[in-house]
Image (tube, rainbow, N blue to C red):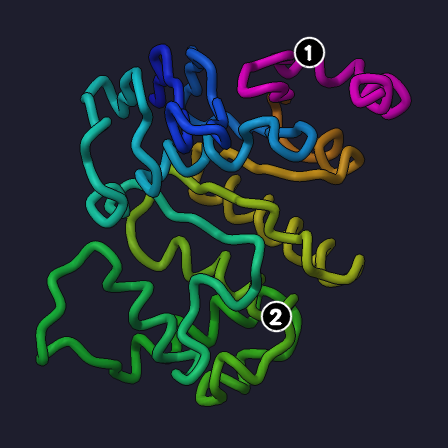
Amino acid sequence: MIQLDQISRVFNPDQINEVMALRKVDLEIKKGEFVCLIGANGSGKTTLLNVLSGAVQPSTGKVFLHGEDITKLPEHKRSRWIARVFQNPLGGTAPDLSVLDNFRLAALRTSKKTLKIGINGAFKEKVRARIAELGLGLEDKVQQPMGTLSGGQRQALTLLMSTMDHTDILLLDEPTAALDPRSAEIVLQTAQRIIEEYQLTTVFITHNLQDALQYGNRLIQMKNGEVERDLDTEAKSGLQLEEMYQWFT
């Protein structure tokens, strides 16, 4: 489904502060795979996600989706297939708009916006029903500005919003890094349910090794801009946390 062919990315080329963020990465992700991506700071994880989303163009190499070369396709055009949840709970939402209005915008992510598109009773009930599945009582706060909610609440809602319109791929960029443990648990459990329900192909960046063990069916470790380890479901199932810690020593 996703194929990276000899992807490299250099920042500040030929300058004293040149950084080789990715080094000829070859990677194939099959439809429905849930890939956990780990690595130390500066290992290339976020750059890899940015290349997938179209936020960053590779210096060399090609990106394929469904066999089609999308290397030059900008981020906003890739949104017809790709949804992304960011590390900062403030990202990906409009804080001054209501929860309902945010869901409306998410539902129109890949559609042409016209004045005749609005919110009707059926849409409002659909949003309330989906939010109620979180068990956080937020279905009664759909008219409340998104910015008044906690970080954990916003991240959970952002995950729901990611599937209000068609998507094939979900990119989770450390979505729990800024959250307390309880909120993080809710967000990841919500992500797991959504991924299974919609059979999404998922790439999940995390620094939490326990979460990397618990979630996903494939584990990739990045190091110095390269894929250091790539464990399939069977290899990952036999992995111990202590062994993973040794990777970073």
* In this rendering, the label closer to the viewer, 2 or 1: 2
Q: Residues within 10 Å of mark 2 (few under 14, many from 20)?
A: many
Residue placed most toward the observer, 216 or 8: 8
Kindly indicate the quadrant of the structure image that contains residue 190.
Answer: bottom right
What's the residue at 32%, 26% (across, down)? 58
Residue 66 among those drawn in magenta:
no
Q: Residues within 10 Å of mark 1 (few under 14, many from 20)?
A: few
Q: CA distance from mark 2 to mark 1?
A: 34 Å
Kindly indicate the quadrant of the structure image that contains residue 56.
Answer: top left
What's the residue at 61%, 46% (across, down)? 174
Query: In which quadrant is the C terminus drawn?
Result: top right
Q: Position of residue 199 (x, y in %)?
A: 44, 36
Instruction: State whether residue 238 is above or below residue 172.
Output: above
Left or right of 73 on screen, residue 52? right
Query: In which quadrant is the N terminus drawn?
Result: top left
The secondary element bearing badge 1 is classed as helix
Left or right of 99 on screen, residue 240? right
Residue 247 among those drawn in magenta:
yes
Residue lying furthest right: 242
Q: Position of residue 177 (x, y in %)?
A: 68, 52
Q: Position of residue 96 (x, y in %)?
A: 42, 84
Residue lying furthest bottom: 143
Of the image marks 2 and 1, the number of the one nearer the N terminus: 2
Where is mark 2, residue-wise? 153
Left or right of 138 on screen, residue 210? right
Q: Which residues are magenta?
A: 220-249
Instruction: State whether residue 198 is above or below residue 7.
Output: below
Where is mark 1, residue-wise? 234
Q: Position of residue 222 (x, y in %)?
A: 61, 21
Residue placed most toward the observer, 15 or 6: 15
